[in-house]
Amino acid sequence: MLCSHSHVSRFQAFIFLLAAAEGASAALVPWHASVVSRQEAGNNTYDFIIAGGGIAGLTVADRLTEDPSVSVLVVEAGPFDQREESVLIPGAYPPFQYFNGLESVPQEALGNRSVGTICAKVVGGGSVVNAMVYLRYAGYLIRRWSEGENFTKPDGDFAARANISWDDSVRGTSGPVKYSYPDYFYPGSANWWNAAKSIGLPIVKDPEAGNNLGIFWTPSVLDATTMTRSDARLNHYENIKVSRSNYHILASTTVSKVIFNGTRAMGVEYLASGGGDTAQVYATKEVILAAGGVHTPQILQLSGIGPQALLNDLGIAVIQDLPGVGQNLQDQSTLTIPWTFTSNVTPNSGSLDSNATYNAEQRGLYDTERTGAYTIVRSLSTNIGQLSLRLVTDDYAAIAAEARSRDPAASLPSDVDPTVLEGYKKQRELIIRQFEGQDAAVGTLHWGTSSSSLIYHLKPLSRGTVNINSTDPLASPVLDYRTATDPIDLAIYVALFRKNRELFAAPDMAALGPAEASPFGAQVRTDEEIIAVLRQQINPSNAHQCCTAAMLPRNLGGVVDSEWNVHGVEGLRVADTSYWPFQTSGAPTATTYASGEKLADVIKRDYNLTSL
Ligand SMILES: Cc1cc2nc3c(=O)[nH]c(=O)nc-3n(C[C@H](O)[C@H](O)[C@H](O)COP(=O)(O)OP(=O)(O)OC[C@H]3O[C@@H](n4cnc5c(N)ncnc54)[C@H](O)[C@@H]3O)c2cc1C
Ligand SMILES: *[C@@H]1O[C@H](CO)[C@@H](O)[C@H](O)[C@H]1NC(C)=O
Ligand SMILES: *[C@@H]1O[C@H](CO)[C@@H](O)[C@H](O)[C@H]1NC(C)=O
Ligand SMILES: *[C@@H]1O[C@H](CO)[C@@H](O)[C@H](O)[C@H]1NC(C)=O
Ligand SMILES: *[C@@H]1O[C@H](CO)[C@@H](O)[C@H](O)[C@H]1NC(C)=O
Ligand SMILES: *[C@@H]1O[C@H](CO)[C@@H](O)[C@H](O)[C@H]1NC(C)=O
Ligand SMILES: *[C@@H]1O[C@H](CO)[C@@H](O)[C@H](O)[C@H]1NC(C)=O
Ligand SMILES: *[C@@H]1O[C@H](CO)[C@@H](O)[C@H](O)[C@H]1NC(C)=O
Ligand SMILES: *[C@@H]1O[C@H](CO)[C@@H](O)[C@H](O)[C@H]1NC(C)=O
């Protein structure tokens, strides 16, 4: 989840990375306690090398290094953060300096807009910069979820007053990933909650229990003892590093390619993220890619694994022709709807910015007692609604039928590989069944309690691409989200938009005197009028990029098999959100942690490794 006010300052990020890269090369750390320099890494051979130290990468590294006989090197493009307030304190969000900004190509269904989008670039990846929403999706993998997490209950009286509910039996309390809830809410969140109830949205007892359809407080990746962020750097590295001389991180360093001997992955080539000479480091067992949904396909393509024609055009020797690499790109696009109010209640999430007295009071409360508005991620509120298509519109069956009647090929680029098309057909049918069913959310509604509401589109049928157009590993790949190129996505957006209007028109919200502001407004009425504004306003990315190295059979355009091995080569797996075939109806963080645990189990089984 992104805040509505987020902007990327590439300049800021660039300056910061340069400074951090210099700092890292100056520090020489011995062979223990784990931050290694380029020299030390280059002179070691590791059992496993992990490219990318984000949520998936650090989860797998932690679990593999439980066996003291195993050595692991994580190579991470970003620096260690400096534990800034914008990282740690929810109310001081966001830490722009660890955002890696990437511009999309013009989006044909969005008025040919090029849109700035974000990936994390820091040790800990998205978990260091994200909006802390911790939300599982469907009912499976739950065992691994509860083992990996440590939920702290809110105070009972507060929970009752705030309408926070949960089911103890599904929430883990002994794992490393801490989560809880803010201990404060803006009064307007009750208006939203009561309005949502009055239009028929059910109250979800526990969104982590396998069904998250309805309204609930969003669990937040907070350490409840300090009310600070619990990120992967802390929970899968910092808290264990003293006892693990076998767990190394090489920060501010970009993996440029996987090195092969024939079809066996032997190690990686890397260079300082600020530029410079390349060096190699070798893995005796496996290389694991965890560079995220945008950069894992980039590394694969740079390594000679991808669509053959693309590799040939760039003069890259083909190790394996895998047409699915970089295809099937999905995100969960967002729509920000501006509102004015004649009588909104204060304080609200805007008050931290507009009322210096209130801001000082709340910051004081946070600093002294770890309580108040600063326990909430800035600009957000505390509750959301997750809606199945049935909860959004009575026309759900007609929308599903229309989706089924369309030619799936029309939703993909015209030069799509036939195997990728076959895989998409399977996905499409599964997603259409979700449209007809009662299990999966297609959208999220949120009101930050101030001047905008948000809609997230969770289950797109449109598919984009991420392809390299250069052999320079420090160049960004070409990002084409192709958002809303499938018109069914717009039909679902229109329904979500109308549902949001219905919610704001319900008495509990109407009491605040809301009026949709430009470019929306009462004059925007017909589906066509709404769609025209949507094309101008949809943001293609919520930084939930996935699915660009999908876990599917090879004849369905897949890139990895069901044990995360890249098809056609040995010693190479993909751990991050790239391997998902399609988006979940949660937010990615919880699933990425849980599937990292699962993958580590599989690798430990394969090599007879021990666990703690
Ligand atoms: C601003 C923002 C807000 C978000 N809000 C939420 C939220 O509230 N809730 C939620 O569930 N999800 C949220 N997300 C999404 C979530 O954080 C990601 O989906 C998740 O981090 C994905 O995990 P991953 O392991 O696949 O990749 P990441 O955590 O992104 O890790 C990938 C890492 O690989 C590194 N890397 C990239 N290329 C290379 C290379 N060539 N060599 C070495 N390293 C490389 C990157 O620097 C990065 O650190 C948000 C994301 C962002 C950016
Ligand atoms: C290995 O160590 C030597 C001596 O410290 C150094 O000169 C060399 O550059 C290192 N190798 C790599 C690949 O970093
Ligand atoms: C977008 O660009 C394409 C190709 O240049 C063009 O055909 C199309 O008309 C443009 N669409 C809009 C809405 O401007
Ligand atoms: C779980 O988190 C709480 C709050 O930070 C902490 O007090 C407790 O020790 C943690 N439990 C475990 C097993 O780590
Ligand atoms: C909680 O629910 C009660 C009962 O429906 C309602 O009166 C109250 O306003 C709600 N409060 C919040 C913060 O949602
Ligand atoms: C590459 O693989 C071949 C065949 O397995 C082996 O003989 C050779 O030693 C390997 N080369 C390297 C550099 O490991
Ligand atoms: C600003 O915040 C203070 C402290 O909470 C409050 O007393 C005051 O009424 C607020 N002012 C406005 C204009 O909302
Ligand atoms: C690659 O594509 C980007 C647009 O995404 C463009 O700015 C850049 O110039 C292209 N690079 C090459 C080498 O073609
Ligand atoms: C793991 O153990 C099994 C059973 O003891 C053995 O057959 C297998 O070869 C071992 N695998 C590895 C990689 O050591």
Image: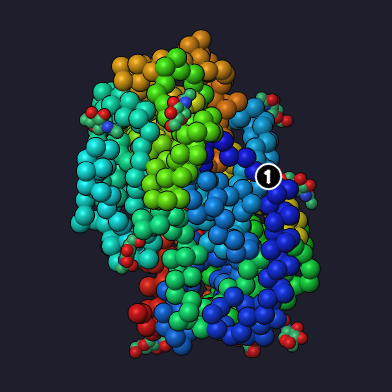
Q: Nearer the viewer, residue 560 or 26?
A: 26
What percent of the width, then of the height, locates residue 164?
A: 27, 42
Disc 1: which residue: 9
Q: Quadrant of the C terminus?
A: bottom left
Q: Nearer the viewer, residue 494 or 271?
A: 271
Q: Residue at x 30, y 16 (%)?
A: 507
Q: Residues within 10 Å of mark 1 (few under 14, many from 20)?
A: some
**Up-down: is 401 above or below 481?**
above
Q: Nearer the viewer, residue 329 or 13?
A: 13
Give the number of marks: 1
Q: Residue at x 31, y 29 (%)?
A: 190
Q: Residue furthest top?
A: 523
What percent of the width, then of the height, locates residue 568?
A: 55, 69
Q: Residue at x 58, y 39 (%)?
A: 6
Q: Residue at x 67, y 30 (%)?
A: 112
Q: Quadrant of ligand 5?
A: top left
The reply to whether residue 18 is in sight is yes
| Quadrant assignment, res 62 | bottom left
**Up-down: is 402 above or below 551?**
above
What percent of the width, then of the height, locates residue 601?
A: 37, 73
The reply to whether residue 420 is in sight is no
What percent of the width, then of the height, locates residue 355?
A: 51, 30
Amino acid at the residue labelled 1: Ser
Q: Nearer the viewer, residue 367 or 28?
A: 367
